[in-house]
Image: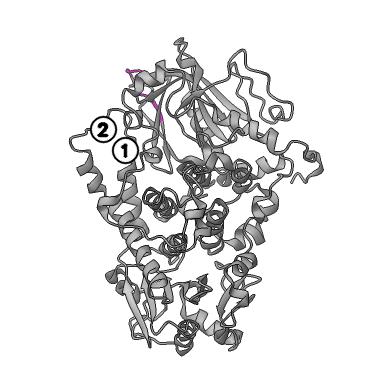
Amino acid sequence: MSSPFSTPHERQIHRTPQADDPPPTTRFPAMSTSCPVETAYELKLLRGEAVIREDKNVMYIGPFGRVKGRILVTTYRMTFVVNDNRTICEEYKLDIPLGQIAKIEKFGYASSSRKDDSYGFQILCKDYRTYRFASDPSTHSRRDICETLNIYAFPLSYKLKLFAFAYRDSMPKPSIDGWKVYSAMGELERMGVGQCKFWRIIDINKEYKFAETYPSLLAIPTASADEGNAFLKKIGEFRSRQRIPVLSWFDRKTLATITRSSQPLCGVTGRKNLDDEAHLRNIREANAHCSELQIYDARPNVNATVNKAKGGGYEENYELSKLTFLDIHNIHVVRESMKKFVQLLSSSGVGVDEKHVYKMIDETKWLMHIASILDASARIVHNIATNRQSVLVHCSDGWDRTAQLTSLAMIQLDRYYRTIEGFIVVIEKEWCSFGHKFAQRYGFAGHGDENSSDSERSPVFPQFVECVWQIMQQFPTCFEFNSRFLIAILDEMYACRFGTFLYNSEKARIAENKCHETTISLWSYILENRQRFENPLYKKAKNHGVISVNPSYCRLEIWTEYYARSNPHVVTPHAESVQLLETRPSWSHLDFFDEIRNLENILYAGGEDSSDHDDDDDDDTN
């Protein structure tokens, strides 16, 4: 089956349609008449996609020098097409989804530019890659292209709809509804929570009035639930954002649990809350094997202490509890580290200096951060699997580092989460429903708003995904999915074609904006094309449950398949010859968008006609 993700937003040069290609299927709508732009190059469009502007005289300043061509801007992407009479190059194009764009910068002045590449613009992407284009200084084409890109890359700033909604409006109903893969009640029942007398499922947050960044359904100790809502509200007043300790994962055999929360609001005076202490005691006593509750604060000790001056704090001197700081750095440190790391690996002007590359990679400290997260997750796994001890995890607000640690521990403890469906459940539960701020971290502030604050952006979720990839390298037969699956998820998180990662919380995504009705889920595509993402080495019969990663810095690898995709000097030796002379480059010559359309035909074949559907901070910084 054709896949929509064979080269997921690869942003390399891809094959363009040829004269002898079959005509596009009639299931795909013609170009919208609201954007009447006729182009000499026939760009095959996605459903709901329309061409907005074309510039026929542009140069792409790429890894092999300057390449002449044209740019087409649509409501979904910017495409560069080669047209410099080199026949072999005319078969390829460059695609950049507009959701990937973080900033558009002009360089050079028309009056002073003499060189062909001294006047133009560059596109800075949210994953820190940069693409540079030279324009003709004798025209206003640069101004027009940049204005168009600014409008459609940041649609919310101009009161336009995100592409995910337009895409859904033009599509029939999917044969697999990805929005239904995860059910909070179903997942709690799968773990056995409903059959355990020590835990109770509650709906105190069913209208998101108790904690608006929490899911509507929660599980807490029965002893705490018996105390009533007033008891829980007092705990909420003592926890940042009312994010009280609730259940993430439950071992039905040992009764050991992973719970998560935000920091307690102790302040410099060391304020206490007897209800909060009682709630943690109830979590500990719900596990008969647990004589001491292990509390993991993801922050460095010094950062947590600084937070006390801001009214935050940590669980100091809680009865029968052990507090450990994990020394995982905040979003600002991680952002700068990844920026240096990616820019080093994706530098396309020259090849990597092999004499110094490992020293330069080490200086970015990116792998050090990965190692610290993996080490923390391994500690949690040891507590649960070996000591049968219950664990509480939190950071400042409990939606960044906390999600990383609970997710990674669950993946190592529970073989279900190492399947395709199970990994989807991890993301939906620990990230989407528990309020990871996708909109601000990647966001619109990535998905549409040009006025977003860079200080809120941070690669917390990509960092988690890389940690999963690192674990996969150590346990290659224990995961049903492959690295292509992980890359597809990361690319679509930025691209804004699906509604899965829109907004900052379950409340905003589901209750307020009805994304489950007005957008398509990424998981619909993943599951329809699951063979593309399956790991041929996966041995379900020999997958004996718990695995534990070796977090040693020496065991970590560099994920060049993802980070160095735009640098063919890293991807393969003699990349220039491969790209220009081979008929099948190593990263595949297939057109990403052609594959999406092929899948749509298969996925929605025989489906109902589309006309039947509606046209329808105190952040974790310390």
Q: Is the residue under label 1 in contact with that under label 2 (CB below 8 Å)?
A: yes
Answer left or right for 347 relative to 72.
left
On the image, the x and y values in percent for residue 273 come to 44, 87
Residue 304 or 277: which is nearer the viewer?
A: 277
On the image, the x and y values in percent for residue 278 come to 47, 88
Q: How is the image coloured?
A: one colour
Q: Disc 1 marks which residue?
A: 345
* Quadrant position of residue 300: bottom left
* Quadrant in the picture for the C terminus: bottom left
Dot placed on the residue nearer the N-terminal end, 2 or 1: 1
* Quadrant position of residue 123: top left
Q: Disc 2 marks which residue?
A: 352
Answer left or right for 558 relative to 198.
left
Residue 94 marker? none
On the image, the x and y values in percent for residue 126 come to 43, 44
Q: Residue at x 60, y 66 (%)?
A: 190
Which secondary structure, mark 2?
A: loop
- State the CA–CA distance, disc 2 to disc 1: 8 Å
Q: Residue at x 69, y 35 (%)?
A: 602
- Using the rendered image of the protein, determine whether residue 160 is visible from the camera's viewpoint: no
Answer left or right for 307 relative to 519.
left
> Which amino acid lies under the numbered mark 1 shown in the image of this protein?
Leu
* Quadrant in the picture for the N terminus: top right
Q: Specify start and end residues of the magenta stretch as a single range.
A: 114-121
* Quadrant position of residue 496: top right
Asked if residue 241 is among those painted magenta in the image, a careful observer would answer no
